[in-house]
C-alpha cells in the first residue's frame, strides 16, 4: 500500500540502484512534476531526481484537491513510505518551498529528517503576513501567471486546456493565500536558499530569513532574473545544487569515518 501511495505522489526521472542520494523537487503553484524533467542532465549521475505529483493535474487530474497546504504536506509525508528511509534532499520553488519545508518538518518528527532542504523564490514562514494575495477572478489569475511566464499564454488561449488546468491553479492559489506559516520546530539539516535578483515576490533580505528554520548552516545564492529565474539560469542552479549534493555525501562520509574510529 505504501508503494502505491509513493508511486501516486512521486514521479521518478532518474532513480537507479546507484542513486544513494535522491533530490525530491516540489513544484510551484499551478506547476507540475514535469517541470523538473530536464534536471537529471545537469546533476551527478549517482543522484536520483524525483518530483512530487500534486493532485488535480497531469495524470492525477481526477484526484481530490487538498484543502490546505499543511494537509498537502501531511499527505505527501504519509505517501513517502520507504522513500523517507533514503538520503533525501528536498528542493521547492515558490509555493513548493513552503510545501517542502512543511514536509521536512514532518519527516524530522518521524525520525527520518532530510539531509538538506533547498528553498527557492519564497518568503520564510515567519514573513508571510504582508505578502501579496494571489486569488482573484479567473482572468486575474491567468494574467498573474502569464506575467511571470509568458509561455503559459498559449495554454489559456485554448478553451479546452484552460478548462482543464484552471481548477488546480485556483486551488493552489487558495492554498498559498490561506497558509499562515509562523513558527515551526527547527530543522536539524542545513538549508540552502535561492532567489532571482529581480524577483518581485521576495527580496534577497527576506530570503535570508530562512536561516531561522534550522539549527544547522544556512547559505543563500542569488542568481540573475525574476521569480522564475530558474528557467533561464537552470545550468547555474543545477551546478550549485551539484555542490550541495556533494556536500551531503561529504558529511555522510565524515560521519561514517568518525563512527568507525570511535
Image: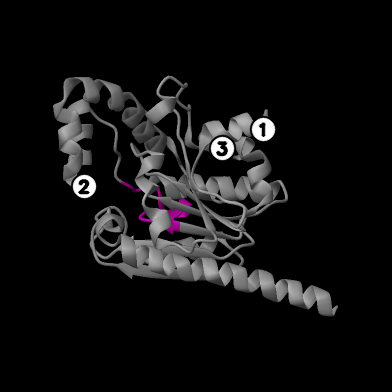
29 to the left or right of 9: left
Q: Residue furthest front?
A: 17
- Residue at x 56% of width, y 72% of height: 247
Up/down of 97 relative to 177, above or below: below
Identify the element where label 3 is drawn: helix
Q: Looking at the magenta stretch, what is its main secondary structure?
A: loop
- Residue at x 41% of width, y 41% of height: 33
Residue 147 position, x and y percent, is 17, 44
Residue 92 position, x and y percent, is 44, 51
Identify the element where label 1 is drawn: helix
Q: Is residue 121 magenta?
A: yes
Q: Which residue was labeled with disc 2? A: 148
| The label number, if any, that marks residue 2 in the structure image | 1
Category of crowding for the residue at label 1, using alpha-carbon neighbours closer than 10 angstroms: few (below 14), some (14–19), many (at least 20): few
| The label number, if any, that marks residue 175 in the structure image | none
Category of crowding for the residue at label 3, using alpha-carbon neighbours closer than 10 angstroms: few (below 14), some (14–19), many (at least 20): many
First reached walking from the N terminus: tag 1 or tag 3:
1
Task: Name the quadrant of the C terminus.
Answer: bottom right
Q: Which residue was labeled with disc 3? A: 76
User: CB under 8 Å between callouts 2 and 3?
Assistant: no
Residue 195 position, x and y percent, is 34, 62
Q: Residue furthest right?
A: 262
12 to the left or right of 164: right
Amino acid at each position: 500500500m505504501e508503494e502505491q501511495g509513493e508511486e501516486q505522489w512521486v514521479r521518478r526521472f532518474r532513480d537507479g540502484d546507484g542513486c544513494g542520494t535522491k533530490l525530491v523537487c516540489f513544484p510551484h503553484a499551478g506547476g507540475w512534476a514535469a517541470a523538473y524533467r530536464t534536471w537529471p542532465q545537469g546533476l551527478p549521475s549517482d543522484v536520483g531526481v524525483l518530483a512530487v505529483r500534486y493532485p488535480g493535474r497531469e495524470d492525477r487530474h481526477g484526484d481530490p484537491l487538498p484543502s490546505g497546504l499543511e494537509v498537502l504536506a501531511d499527505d505527501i509525508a504519509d505517501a513517502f513510505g520507504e522513500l523517507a528511509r533514503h538520503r533525501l534532499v528536498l528542493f521547492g520553488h515558490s509555493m513548493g518551498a513552503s510545501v517542502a519545508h512543511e514536509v521536512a518538518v514532518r519527516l524530522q518528527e518521524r525520525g527520518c529528517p532530510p539531509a538538506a532542504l533547498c528553498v527557492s523564490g519564497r518568503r520564510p514562514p515567519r514573513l508571510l503576513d504582508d505578502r501579496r494575495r494571489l486569488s482573484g477572478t479567473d482572468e486575474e489569475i491567468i494574467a498573474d501567471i502569464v506575467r511571470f511566464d509568458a509561455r503559459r499564454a498559449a495554454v489559456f488561449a485554448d478553451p479546452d486546456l484552460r478548462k482543464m488546468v484552471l481548477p488546480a491553479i485556483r486551488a493552489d492559489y487558495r492554498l498559498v493565500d490561506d497558509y499562515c506559516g509562523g513558527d515551526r520546530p527547527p530543522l536539524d539539516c542545513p538549508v540552502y536558499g535561492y532567489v532571482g535578483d529581480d524577483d518581485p515576490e521576495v527580496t534577497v533580505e527576506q530570503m535570508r530569513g530562512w536561516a531561522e528554520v534550522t539549527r544547522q548552516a544556512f547559505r543563500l545564492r542569488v542568481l540573475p532574473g525574476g521569480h522564475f529565474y530558474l528557467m533561464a539560469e537552470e545550468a547555474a542552479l543545477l551546478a550549485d545544487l551539484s555542490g550541495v549534493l556533494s556536500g551531503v555525501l561529504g558529511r555522510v562520509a565524515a560521519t561514517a569515518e568518525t563512527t568507525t574510529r570511535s
